[in-house]
Amino acid sequence: MNYINFFTSLGKLVKWNNLFATYQSSSLLGSSGAASDIQAGFSSNPTLVSGLSPSVVGWAQQVSGWESQLLQVFGANLWASIQGDVNSPSQQANAIIPYLYLNMVANSQTINRNTSTIAFTTGASNKGNGTLLVSALNNQTGISDERLLNETVQIQCTADGISGGVSGGEAWSITGFPTAQQFSTQTPGSGSLTNGLNTADQSAGNILSNGSFDSYSTSGFTGWTIESLGAGTWYGSFTYVNSSGQETTPSPVGNVTLIAGQAATWQLGSLPTGAVSMNFYLSESSTVAGSLQKTGITASYISTTQYSAGRFAPTTNGTGLAPPASAPTVAAYTPGSSVTQSLNYYAVATGGGSLALTPNSGGDVVISQSLLNMNRTNMWALMGYLSAQNLTTGSTLTIDIEDVTASTAMSIWNADPSTITAAFTIHDALAYLENIFPPPVLRIRWAQSSTQGSTAIIYVDAMSVIAATNFGNWNVSVARGTTDFRVGDIFTVTTTNNNAGIFQTYLGTNYNGYLPSSTSPTIADSLAT
């Protein structure tokens, strides 16, 4: 693809689109521009220009027609001309721009960059003391989204627990500047959203089960798995090498969560002759030992090393070992006293319970939950309340969402918990998740808890995991407070954009698109001036 030719052509369209927009503005052709200036020159005989104002309006309308034809006809021709170069399935600009983005990345091409910011303020008269989470991060570019508008947006509570809404799941409206039509001279705005944003804790969109820790029995917290050191999820698949040396994977991946001291057993079937191995990943540090067995053949494996990924290969080749013929069976595990429910101390009154962690003589205290229904498209919000009492230094608390590689995708605490206050305090994070299969895991781990005295305790309450609401190419979520929100509570979000990139601003305003950018671009904005 010839980038200079394409952007030279596009630059001329952008240049005259911007000039035509200027010619239609009130400052040039409107009552405060051309009309008033000309009328001032005829002040001695104003009747000579008595029909000027209607004429000016007509001129502006003609310019609007020129602009429409320029962009919708000739602009469409230009975009269609590169369909094959970027392998787009469509000739439409909106469809071509994402493919052009990938093409430019592959060829190290960039346009001039816009710099945008986002910030919010809390209403001085708010009744609720929760907070707002906002982020303008663009997951593809890794920087603040360059399509943000210069805009002030009001987020207002419209329904609470008293007015027919849900306490802890209050409804919110989002109101920005009015939207503008494509290729219009109006100042663009993000419009409004009357449904789709709720306080996360009790929202139907909260995918975390029992995040309030109110459902509890002697077997543990509903929806949660109580772990200990060495626990984790195995992701295993059996493979074999046939007589031709070709390795195959004849079975789907089998997943099972193991607690320290547990064992998983698969029932094996038959398989053609070949060497058999087991691919595995264990998400926690542990010593692993075991064997693959078939009648008349025993192939053992053992490891004392932490692996991020690896393979146990049987030491004996036999007539073939098969993939699992059924789901693995797992030995039972009874929760210990280090993970309990507190009915006396909690962040929010809903249900009246919280998670209480006390020292474990064995070392770590771990409780986790697999998170289903996550996707790569949404930005996700993780939030929760923490409180701690009688802690000394020397231990580590980690509350994070981990993906299949055991890397931390997002965290609200990963430090010594001795600095956590006795009063419940909200902690939160916003992030995109890249690896979502198998499902990511929310894990609460108190490491080296055995270093703490018998009265040390950590409380966790009102946890939520929810897809943030996208509005105006930025993301927002509302975190519950210890005092619930009421109708009329507001947050004000301000977004700014320096619109330094002429091409980038044009693409964002008219197509809601963007291309790779840099402060030292390979394609100069001078092509559009």
Image (cartoon, grey):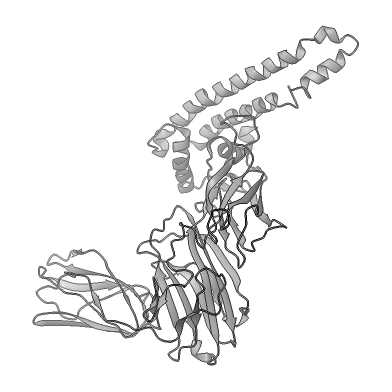
Taking the spot 62% from the left edge, 63% from the top edge, the residue there is: 130
The residue lying toward the viewer, choosing from 322 and 421, is: 421
Q: How many marks?
A: 0
The residue lying toward the viewer, choosing from 90 and 215, is: 215
Q: Would residue 278 appear left or right of 75 to someone viewing this image?
A: left
Q: Quadrant of residue 278?
A: bottom left
Q: Is residue 244 above or below residue 157?
A: below
Q: Is residue 481 above or below residue 147?
A: below
Q: Is residue 449 above or below residue 269?
A: below
Q: Would residue 85 appear left or right of 477 to someone viewing this image?
A: left
Residue 1 visible in rendering: no
Residue at the farthest right position: 44
Where does the image place residue 393, in percent across and percent down from the top left? 59, 87
Q: Quadrant of residue 188?
A: top right
Q: Quadrant of the N terminus?
A: top left
Residue 59 visible in rendering: yes
Q: Quadrant of residue 186?
A: top right
Q: Quadrant of the C terminus?
A: top right
The residue lying toward the viewer, choosing from 302 and 494, is: 494
Where does the image place residue 93, in percent across and percent down from the top left? 47, 34
Q: Would residue 523 appear left or right of 329 to someone viewing this image?
A: right
Where does the image place residue 318, in percent across and percent down from the top left? 11, 77
The residue lying toward the viewer, choosing from 17 and 365, is: 365
Taking the spot 55% from the left edge, 73% from the top edge, the residue there is: 413
Taking the spot 53% from the left edge, 40% from the top edge, the residue there is: 512
Taking the spot 45% from the left edge, 92% from the top edge, the residue there is: 361
Where does the image place residue 192, in percent across and percent down from the top left? 58, 42
